[in-house]
Amino acid sequence: MKNEYLRLAESYESLAKSYRSLAKADNNDVPWKEESSNQEKEAVVDITAVRKVLAEKTQSGKSDAVKALLLKYGANKLSAIAPENFKNLLQEAEEL
């Protein structure tokens, strides 16, 4: 057990040494620095946002259109729709 503790302590010391060298390094020297791009990252649409819009449309009397929209994406209910389709579904639901 004593040897494991010593190996663990050595690993932590090595890790601390790496962090110290990173802290002292210039930002341009960090090898894994993310490339900045001019393109904005797409916002992720979650099921709650889609559910909210669909509920509003249903309450405003467009339940048939909501059902047709769900069927267009191959499902009878929202939870059966693949998350990668949420963005498009949300856009179409807002247009109803």
Image: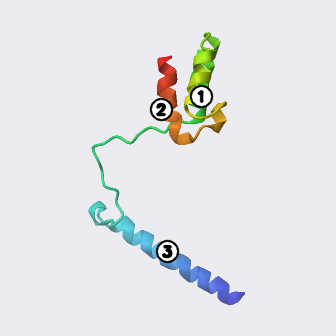
Residue 26 sits in quarter: bottom left
Q: Nearer the viewer, mark 3 or mark 1?
A: 1
The 10 Å Cα crowd at callout 1, few under 14, some 14 to 19, many 20 or more, is: some
Tell which of 30 and 14 is nearer to you.
30
- Circle on res. 15: 3
Amino acid type at circle 3 is: Leu
Image coordinates of residue 22 in percent, x first then y, are 38, 68
Amino acid type at circle 2 is: Asn
Q: How is the image coloured?
A: rainbow
- Circle on res. 70: 1
Residue at the bottom extreme of this rendering = 3
Image coordinates of residue 18 in percent, x first then y, are 43, 73
* Nearest to N terminus: mark 3 or mark 1: 3
* Nearest to N terminus: mark 1 or mark 2: 1
Mark 1 and 2 residues: CB-CB less than 8 Å, in contact?
no
Which residue appears at 47% of the width and 26% of the height?
91
Check the picture and name the quadrant holding the N terminus: bottom right
**Vertical side of 81 occupied by 29: above or below:** below
Amino acid type at circle 1 is: Leu
Q: Secondary structure at mark 2?
A: helix
* Nearest to N terminus: mark 2 or mark 3: 3
